[in-house]
């Protein structure tokens, strides 16, 4: 069973430029540094920020390997990549 996560509440305001400050205590607790990137989700009167982490090199290589296996199973070859890119760009 997953341990319960602590929820911390704070208030903030949006600036005239649409900027919102994440309170310092939350930034420290979540390990957020300057340049952190977020996915922003909006639904009704709710705005949610989800931190986006770049994959580690090992995670990237594992994903690359899975994709290569799927491409091979689908009969795709490395030479097909340029053709597919050209087709997609031609539709734009």
Image (cartoon, rainbow, N blue to C red):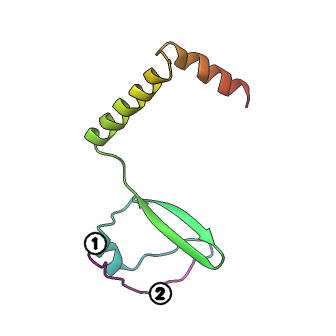
Query: In the displayed structure, would residue 57 be above or below residue 8?
Result: above
Q: Earlier in the sequence, mark 1 or mark 2?
A: 1
Q: Which mark is residue 11?
A: 2
In the image, residue 7 lies in the stretch drawn in magenta: yes
Pointer 1 local density, CA inside 10 Å: few below 14, some 14–19, many at least 20: few
Residue range corresponding to the magenta coloring: 1-15
Secondary structure, mark 1, is loop
Place of residue 3 in the rendered image (x, y in percent of width and height, measured from the top left) = 26, 76
For the residues labelled 1 and 2, the Cα–Cα distance comes to: 28 Å
Identify the residue at the far top of this view. 79
Residue at 28%, 39% in the rendered image? 57
Residue at 60%, 16% in the rendered image? 83
Q: Quadrant of the N terminus?
A: bottom left
Place of residue 88 in the rendered image (x, y in percent of width and height, measured from the top left) = 66, 27
Mark 1 vs mark 2: give the one in front: 1
Identify the residue at the far right of this view. 91
Q: Which mark is residue 2?
A: 1
Place of residue 60 in the rendered image (x, y in percent of width and height, measured from the top left) = 33, 38
Quadrant of the image occupied by residue 70? top left
């Amino acid at each position: 069973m997953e341990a319960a996560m602590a929820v911390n509440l704070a208030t903030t305001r949006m600036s005239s430029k649409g900027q919102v400050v994440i309170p310092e205590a939350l930034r420290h607790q979540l390990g957020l540094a300057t340049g952190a990137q977020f996915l922003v989700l909006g639904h009704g009167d709710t705005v949610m920020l989800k931190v986006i982490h770049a994959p580690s090199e090992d995670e990237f290589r594992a994903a690359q390997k899975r994709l290569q296996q799927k491409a091979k199973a689908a009969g795709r070859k490395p030479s097909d990549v340029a053709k597919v890119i050209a087709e997609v760009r031609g539709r734009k």
